[in-house]
Image (cartoon, rainbow, N blue to C red):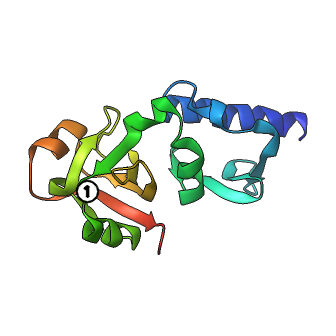
Amino acid sequence: MTLGQKALAEKFCNALDYIFGKTVSSSIDMRALYLELSKTGRLRRVYLSQVLIATVKSDGGIALTIAGAKSLVGHPSFAMNCVRLIEDEEIEELVKKGRSVFSSHVSHCGDLVRVNSEVVVVDHDGEVLAVGKATLPSQLMLSISRGVGVKVRVGISS
């Protein structure tokens, strides 16, 4: 990893910490990161051991993949970005296929979940089912029983 790539890797890790909680980036091995840049030199994709873990959006946000969510979900601070489903096999199967999560199916929601924030949907055991974007803030997602809470981008079976 060159000096410029090392600086970009640190910048990516700082963005992870800012978006998903303090010290979340400590669960990623910086030496195993591979950074893909655009033609203009901006960071586009991030790989960990040749597996895509995140895409950097044009607004600076980070879109996690399933592999990226699985690598971060064990960190205690990252739980504040997760939406936990109620214990129902049928709902879990639908979410795994990439269907949206309704707020009535949410049993717990992290404090950092806000509208349009990147969230990870986990089952009652804490296993990653999908990644997506929140359509409601955490408190509202828990209090109402109608409407979509998370628009799933990709599920583990899709």
Question: Regarding mark 1 in the picture, which secondary structure is present there?
Answer: loop
Q: Answer left or right for 43 relative to 78.
A: right
Question: Does any portion of residue 45 appear in the rendered image?
Answer: yes
Write down the residue under mark 1: 87
> Which residue is more in the foreground, 49 or 3?
49
Q: Seen from this angle, which residue lies furthest right?
A: 2
Residue located at (64% from left, 35% from top): 27
Residue 12 image offset from top left, x and y in percent: 65, 37
Query: Which quarter shows the N terminus?
Result: top right
> Which residue is more in the foreground, 158 or 40?
158
Residue 97: name its quadrant.
bottom left
Residue 23: name its quadrant.
top right
Instruction: From this view, report whether residue 64 is shown above or below residue 60.
Output: below
Instruction: From this view, report whether residue 55 is shown above or below residue 92.
Output: above
Residue located at (9% from left, 57% from top): 146
Residue 93 image offset from top left, x and y in percent: 34, 71
**Amino acid type at image mark 1:** Glu
Instruction: From this view, report whether residue 99 is shown above or below residue 84.
Output: below
> Which residue is more in the foreground, 147 or 71?
71
Residue 67 image offset from top left, x and y in percent: 59, 56
- Category of crowding for the residue at label 1, using alpha-carbon neighbours closer than 10 angstroms: few (below 14), some (14–19), many (at least 20): some
